């Protein structure tokens, strides 16, 4: 970070506390530029994400979500526009892009397919070792991150291929958390898990976010999950940013979301329908519990 | 990255060559290659080269594509060409110590270079104009006589089809795993050769694991549909010889006869 020294960068202080940890400026990305297979995946996307925020990213398949998150941690280089991490352009020095990847941890879809080491311990230690940390520090980080995802001590010494599907996924996520990134990006972390597994994993991610107080970006198709845990939501469609705002605000625009092939959480939909029927309820309701209370208060008001 | 490797080089088209049956293309390709090596003098070499170029132009595929197929073997062509310069008999043109370039050597070198170049380009005609499925179908049909010797022709063809089918899938998978490991700070772009080979381990192991998983799934799916090999199976696309194939066979035969005639008429110079 460059407090005070590089005044040329726009710092976004909101109430003097939060600083934009990630800032995207007119981001564009074209696959196979200049060939007949040219395809624009991202078009003029700008946004800012503040430190400590939990941001949900939603969008239809092929809306550019995956491209966007890969740009944010420097796996892809934007064909136009800039990305700033803590106020610094991440492609300023392409040779140091690995450092950006340590700061912006990325968990891909189905991360369990990246496990390769002999033991779970060694696999989780892969990231910290690449960062050049010493044995002691690596050990601390491995154990801490294994704790976050709920892997038992004795599981650290078995082969990752002996774990169950859900455990493999959690081990892979631990491998990214172990690098202690400022920003953690998760691309559909719960895809293919059973309901209990989803629930456990999500609450672990929320706990992790609370303890470490770092920034988390969650790409998901489950509106219910996003509604429950995200502070703000970024809506993508056809490579463009459609909306970006507080979760309740976004989901109160049910019709607009449906137009781009998305839906709102079931409970929000019920509220929207009640509103249409003439009941005076708040449509910014995101969880069943809130909905329950809202309906109760509405009924008692009659 | 991995995506940019050209594989399954089939370029769909509508030319005379595209319309030929894959079996006749394979047979005529083999025959042409044999005749390229049967040429004994410049006249017959010129004849077969012109014939090959004619075939290449008839595919209506840009000549640049064919030149690119040559780029891969450019080193081998030049190396064998140079080596051949020094092997041969005849008048000595240039000598240094034990190394001599002779007229015979020069003729040898020209022949070798032209033969390899034509061989590569005419083989590219087959892969450029035939879809991989047609190709394996045709190979299966052509290998059928081997069944007499208990060769499992259908199984071999099936394996080839599956292998071809999964190349893009595996490339995609490689890309994904590479990205995942890069996100964990794997350094694949720098270091000496040993470090680079070591850096591939985090990619190769997951790739192997997922290949076995896919193979298992596929085998299971095939068994669930009671798939059991070639006997009495009908095909969705049945190969047919048409007028195009007969015309191609006649023209090729005339050219091959011409090569033999030129060999006899103008004598052997190598």
Image (cartoon, rainbow, N blue to C red):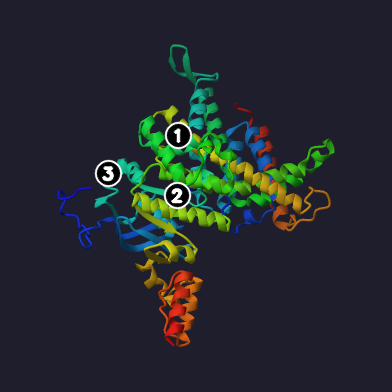
Chain letter for the residue marked with disc 2 in the picture: A
Looking at the rendered image, the quarter that the C terminus of chain B falls into is top right
**Image position, residue A145 (x, y; %):** 43, 43
Describe the element under mark 2 as helix, strand or loop: strand
Q: Which residue is mark 1?
A: B199
Same chain assignment for discs 1 and 3: no
**Image position, residue B244 (x, y; %):** 69, 56
Q: Residue at x 35, y 33 (%)?
A: A132
Q: Earlier in the sequence, mark 3 or mark 2?
A: 3
Q: CA distance from mark 2 to mark 1?
A: 20 Å
The residue carrying pointer 2 sits among few (fewer than 14), some (14 to 19) or many (20 or more) residues within 10 Å by Cα, namely: many
Q: Is residue A179 left or right of residue A152?
A: left
- Residue A217, placed above or below residue B39: below
Q: CA distance from mark 1 to mark 3?
A: 23 Å
Q: Which residue is mark 3?
A: A93
- Residue B214, placed above or below residue A226: above
Q: Is residue A23 left or right of residue A178?
A: left
Which residue is nearer to you in this view: B237 or B124?
Answer: B237
Can the viewer see residue B13 in this picture? Answer: yes
Which residue is nearer to you in this view: A163 or B217?
Answer: A163
Looking at the rendered image, the quarter that the N terminus of chain B falls into is top left
Q: Which residue is mark 2?
A: A107
**Image position, residue A66 (x, y; %):** 44, 56
């Amino acid at each position: 970070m460059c407090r005070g020294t590089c005044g040329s960068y726009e710092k976004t202080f909101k109430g003097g506390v939060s600083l934009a940890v990630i800032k995207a400026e007119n981001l564009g990305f074209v696959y196979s530029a200049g060939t007949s297979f040219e395809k624009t995946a991202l078009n003029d996307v700008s946004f800012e994400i503040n430190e400590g925020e939990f941001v949900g990213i939603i969008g239809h398949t092929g809306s550019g979500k995956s491209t966007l998150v890969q740009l944010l941690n420097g796996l892809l280089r934007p064909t136009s526009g800039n990305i700033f991490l803590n106020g610094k352009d991440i492609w300023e020095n392409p040779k140091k892009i690995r450092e950006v990847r340590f700061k912006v941890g990325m968990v891909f879809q189905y991360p369990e397919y990246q496990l390769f080491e002999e033991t779970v311990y060694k696999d989780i230690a892969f990231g910290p070792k690449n960062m050049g940390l010493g044995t002691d520090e690596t050990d601390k980080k491995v154990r801490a991150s294994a704790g976050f995802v709920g892997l038992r001590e004795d599981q650290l010494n078995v082969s990752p291929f002996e774990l169950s599907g859900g455990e493999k996924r959690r081990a892979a996520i631990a491998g990214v958390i172990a690098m202690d990134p400022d920003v953690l990006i998760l691309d559909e972390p719960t895809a293919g898990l059973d309901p209990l597994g989803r629930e456990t994993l999500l609450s672990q991610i929320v706990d992790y976010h609370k303890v470490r107080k770092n920034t988390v970006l969650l790409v998901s198709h489950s509106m219910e999950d996003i509604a429950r845990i995200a502070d703000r939501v970024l809506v993508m469609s056809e490579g463009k940013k459609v909306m970006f705002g507080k979760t309740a605000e976004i989901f109160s625009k049910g019709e607009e979301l449906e137009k781009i092939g998305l839906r709102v959480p079931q409970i929000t939909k019920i509220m929207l329908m009640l509103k249409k029927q003439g009941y005076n309820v708040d449509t910014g309701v995101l969880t069943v519990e809130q909905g329950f209370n809202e309906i109760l208060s509405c009924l008692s008001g009659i | 990255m991995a995506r940019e490797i050209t594989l399954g080089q089939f370029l769909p088209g509508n030319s005379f060559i595209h319309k030929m049956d894959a079996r006749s293309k394979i047979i005529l390709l083999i025959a042409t290659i044999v005749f390229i090596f049967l040429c004994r003098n410049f006249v017959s070499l010129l004849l077969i080269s012109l014939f090959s170029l004619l075939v290449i132009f008839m595919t209506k595929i840009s000549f640049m594509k064919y030149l690119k197929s040559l780029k891969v073997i450019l080193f081998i062509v030049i190396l064998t060409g140079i080596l051949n310069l020094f092997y041969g008999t005849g008048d000595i043109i240039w000598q240094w110590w034990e190394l001599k370039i002779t007229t015979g050597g020069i003729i040898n070198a020209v022949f070798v270079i032209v033969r390899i170049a034509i061989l590569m380009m005419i083989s590219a005609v087959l892969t450029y104009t035939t879809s991989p499925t047609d190709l394996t179908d045709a190979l299966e049909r052509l290998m059928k006589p081997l069944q007499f010797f208990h060769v499992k022709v259908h199984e071999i063809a099936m394996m080839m089809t599956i292998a071809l089918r999964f190349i893009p899938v595996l490339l995609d998978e490689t890309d994904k795993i590479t990205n995942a490991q890069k996100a964990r700070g794997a350094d694949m772009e720098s270091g000496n050769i040993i470090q680079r080979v070591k850096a591939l381990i985090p990619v190769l192991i997951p790739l192997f694991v997922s290949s076995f998983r896919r193979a298992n799934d596929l085998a299971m799916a095939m068994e669930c549909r009671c798939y059991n090999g070639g006997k009495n199976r009908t095909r969705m696309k049945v190969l047919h010889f048409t007028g195009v194939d007969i015309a191609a066979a006649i023209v090729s035969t005339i050219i091959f006869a011409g090569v033999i005639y030129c060999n006899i008429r103008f004598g052997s110079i190598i």
